[in-house]
Amino acid sequence: MRFTQSTPVALLMIPLAAISTANAEIAYSQTLADLDSTDFGWFSHSEPRATRNFKHADNFQLSTPTQINQINWWGMTEGVSSVDLENFDTFQIEFYTSRTTNNNRIKPDVLIGSESFDINQTNTVDTGHRTANGAIKYSHQITLGSAVTFDADTTYWISISARSIDGSGDAWQWLDSDLHGGASSSWDFANSRWLALQDTDSAFQLVSVPAPASSFAITIGLVAITRRRR
């Protein structure tokens, strides 16, 4: 499910995607302090593929009830056929509740929100960093059409996945972040199940941008689930 090549370590801070609203607040952040420190990334696709046939999700908790309407994330192509994102045309953002398995591992459970965006809508920025095989590491940013409110101290999951134009071509990788507990999950399309993983975390931010007074944000009712702290 993963792909890596070694790269030299350079002490460079990760560039954040531009946040256009002055009052925006980063409610949750899993980023990478040094973008050259790893080429690791989870394969993550919104539809089944001939190869790299997975969709990835990562868990998070917020300390207070928070409305989220902007997402920042980092990723790249695996770089076999090309170094850019020419094999991908859309990104999908999904939110799930969480469940605990019999062996006390956690997985995504109920889908509570989903939106898809044309890749041209994701404010794609070349970070200037490359993998060992030359693939460009990109940052992305989208504003959700409908804001989602999350409860405090409750485990949720976010899945970020790309749609491949050629399912046998390059796979998309959601770049690793610095360690935030290591729990994550991948949907195995071949066997139609979420896999509970304990490895590393993915690079993303959840941003709360106050809406104008005339705007109407939809809050998705979230089911009660087991409370769990990271």
Image (spheres, rainbow, N blue to C red):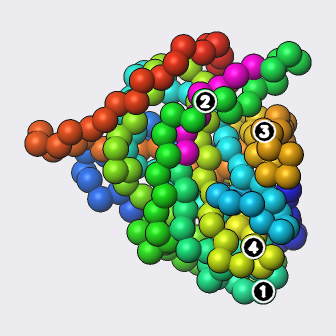
In contact (CB < 8 Å): disc 1 and disc 3 = no
- Are there few (<14), some (14-19), or many (20+) residues within 10 Å of tag 2? some
In space, the residues marked 2 and 1 are separated at their CA atoms by: 36 Å
Magenta region = 94-100
The residue beneath circle 2 is: 110
Look at the numbered disc 3 and give the secondary structure of its residue. Answer: strand
Give coordinates of residue 177: x percent, y percent: 68, 50
Quarter of the image where the C terminus is located: top right
Q: In this view of the protein, which residue sits in the foreground, 146 or 133? A: 146
**Residue at screen point 62% across, 63% down:** 162
- State if disc 1 and disc 2 touch (CB < 8 Å): no
Q: Which callout, 1 or 3, points to the residue nearer the camera?
A: 3
Residue carrying label 3: 194
Q: Which mark is residue 81?
A: 1
Snapshot quadrant of residue 50: bottom right
Q: Is residue 122 left or right of residue 181?
A: left
Q: The residue tagged with tag 4: helix, strand or loop? A: loop
Determine the secondary structure under disc 1: loop
Image position, residue 112 (x, y; %): 51, 34
Q: Earlier in the sequence, mark 4 or mark 2?
A: 2
Give the residue at x 40% y 36%.
Answer: 148
Q: Which comes sooner in the sequence, label 1 or label 3? A: 1
Could you say which disc has been placed on residue 167 in the image?
4
Question: Which residue does the image show at 86% across and 16% down from the upper left?
Answer: 102
Q: Are marks 2 and 3 in contact (CB under 8 Å)?
A: no
